[in-house]
Amino acid sequence: MFKVQLAQKAIHSLTMALNVLIVGAGIGGLIRSDDRMQMAAIALREQGHDVTLLESSRFSNETGAAIHMAPNANGLLKRYGVDIEKVGANECSRIAQYHAESGKALFQVDLTMPNKQWQHKWLLVHRAHLHNALRERAIGKEGKGKPATLRLASKVASVDPEKAEVTLESGQKVSGDVLLGADGVHSLCRQALVLDNAEKYTPFDCGHSAYRFLVPKEEVMADPVCREFVEQEGMLCMIVGEDRRVVVYPCVENKLMNFLMIHPSSESRSDDAGWNQKGDKKRMLESGASLAPQVRALLEKAPEESLKVWTLLDMEVLPTWINGSMALLGDAAHPFLPHQAQGGGQAMEDAVSLAAILPFGTPKEDIPERLRLYEQCRRERANKIQDGTRLSGTSQKDLAKMGKKYDGQYSFLHGCDSPFTDICVIAFAFTNYNFGHDEWDFSKNALNKHLLSKQPYRFRQPVSFGPSPGPRQPLNALPDVHSMAKQNQTVASIRFKTSRTYLQNLFPSSSFSFMSAATVVEASIVCCSLRNMTWLGNTGYDHCGLYIHGVKYTKKDGEILQGTFLPILFENLTDPIITGREEIAAPKWGCDIDVSTSGDSRSVRMSWRGTTFAELEWSGLQAKPQINGVNGTNGVNGTHAGPPPGRPGPPGPPMPKIEDNGMFMYRYVPAVGEPGKADAEYAVFDEYEKKDPSSAASQQDTQDQTTKSATIKFSPGDWNSLPTIHHIAQGLADVPIYGIVEATVKEVPSVGDVRGARRIE
């Protein structure tokens, strides 16, 4: 999963928290939105923001009912330290289905093993207990961040999405940076999004209503007629009829049974269709008259004084959840029917998604864009689950009219043309889709991808974790990190005369050749000791390479590029080896490099696990006037850059003055499972004149020593002594050395990074 800190802007001491306003709902049938509001407050508080909850009632409470906290929701609660098992939640450990009219058992499944596939438990909890736990976490002193401010008796009269501002009925205006509408199914905030189509997006009666009530388990257990529905602990019991059903499950440590009796709305309709509408027990029993005797016995136990009934509302899918600096969440954005028990869970996913996408340090000017990302994260999933919920609550007759068949196990196996087409052909597909998700992980990853898309980052293996820091990519740093750095290096080089006919065999393609037809050419061994490297935590490393001068590359169109070819570069640290190989096609190999100095001498020894294969010596070094450049060599991850001076060599024919304009390297990526075949193979060129300002600065040498008394010795080794590099050592040992042109040791106050390297064609 990508890391936000890799891409986000640097956070400094002046960063301010966002001021987040959350519009909730009052007790007039909308109290269910409180849990959604509290969850948003918790998640955003923990991100470091200032959160204000606007609640229309003078007090905030919750009435008697239970709710599912499926694994996808329970995991989010646990992330924020809300352990509902401590407030009486019990696990859903068994599921059973009965035929409502006959009372016949259709199936019963022990969920002990299936539940182990989820990261978190499937819990059943009393809604009031959940509400209190969320409220305490949102406005209490414990927990990360500043406690949210709860403003009661603050009924909102209008909202301004662009300004993130609300006007209360008192006339007071309250504004913030972000406005969240968590005000339930009859959302005022939603109306502000669909002003021209308010009627189209008004919630409507889906055709069914639901009675709900709680009964102590012991009362049901005492009745032998109906005890089979509750005697198994943690059992979710669904008693399904043609157009009505009864759902029973335990809460409060399996001591209290929650009942839901879904029936045609016409049988209980009244003017008051809110969440807390008083239910009529007589009418409920009349609705259950066609049910089996043992089912009716369950309904008989409903307490008259606390029986509630509410109309199940549905709504057309909104064209958008956002406008300016305002976003909807929960029932305000997507009212849920109860058939999949995901309404609360999806609202919590909305809340956590918002928190993931609005971390501390989010620039205010980015809020509209971030809210669009929130909608992208949540819209498809919420709509899919809504659709699945509608289908699972549809009667067998209506399903038949639609060309579908419900198999009783959350899968539609025939004629499925819903958005679930890709997952509905396996048993419990809805459950798998609902439970197998973590919104924090999903939205956090979406934010990272969003941030990474804003500028080109260099990716390399392992790509699963996003772009890695490197010499050309110091992530999470201030823009002027390089100007603040004290990177420096010692560059020791030996330029020598050698054989064209031998060195041309090191060219990887026929497009490479020497500028001169002479058989005597020049090359250099350059060894650099890099220090105070910013991207390496102010540490350093050494590298040594062979640089072949006076090389040209002839492009397919006939254009000629001139430069230095680098066939091999040894380094003694893994990090730059990886970055150079993958990012700029540098031909790097790892080995031990030991550098020592004594008086006017310097030596470099390269070895592999104790076997030395290269010895370089500079002796009799003397100071000389500063001359920019390092004999025509260019650095890879830090070697000094500059064009060659073209000096003549020792006695023999004079060398032509050939200007090297850059450095050549060659990319080769082998195809997996296909020996001899490349996935990528091409030449790379780094032009000196296109390097960044740090390269120009790097040519300001502070010290310069030179000598013509230098030696180069390579020992080839064999399969036993140098098992992985003996072929390279052999090739270097075979390089003819006809004489030393010049040897230098320079102290350079900066380090280049070869960020100008490009594919030639």
Image (cartoon, rainbow, N blue to C red):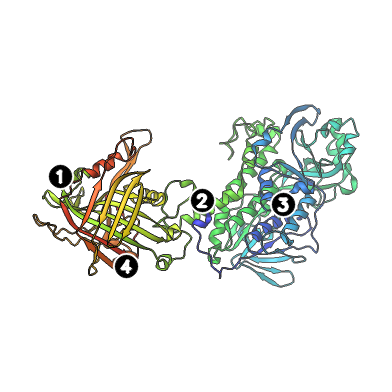
Disc 3 residue crowd, few under 14, some 14–19, many 20+, Cα 10 Å: some
From the viewer's perspective, is the residue at label 2 or at label 4 nearer? 4
In the visual, does 757 lie left or right of 77? Answer: left
Estimate the x, y position of residue 293 in percent, counting from the top left: 87, 30
Q: Secondary structure at mark 1?
A: helix
Q: Nearer the viewer, residue 739 or 314?
A: 739
Q: Quadrant of residue 33?
A: bottom right
Instruction: Give the mark, 3 or 1, whose residue is nearer the N terminus.
Output: 3
Among the 4 quarters of the image, the one containing residue 752: bottom left
Q: Is residue 153 left or right of residue 749?
A: right
First in sequence: mark 2 vs mark 1: 2
Q: How far apart are the alpha carbons under marks 4 and 1?
A: 37 Å
Residue closer to the observer: 139 or 474: 474
Q: Which mark is residue 697?
A: 4
Give the percent coordinates (x, y) of residue 305. Answer: 90, 48
Give the mark, 4 or 1, whose residue is nearer the N terminus: 1
From mark 3 to mark 1, how far is it between C-alphas? 75 Å
Q: Nearer the viewer, mark 3 or mark 4?
A: 4
Determine the CA span between mark 2 and mark 1.
49 Å
Q: Position of residue 243 (x, y in %)?
A: 75, 36
First in sequence: mark 3 or mark 2?
A: 2
Q: Position of residue 605 (x, y in %)?
A: 31, 50
What kind of element bears circle 2?
loop
- The numbered mark at residue 501 is 1
Looking at the image, which residue is at 34% across and 39% down?
Answer: 724
| Residue 700 in view in this figure | no
Question: Mark 3: which secondary structure?
Answer: loop
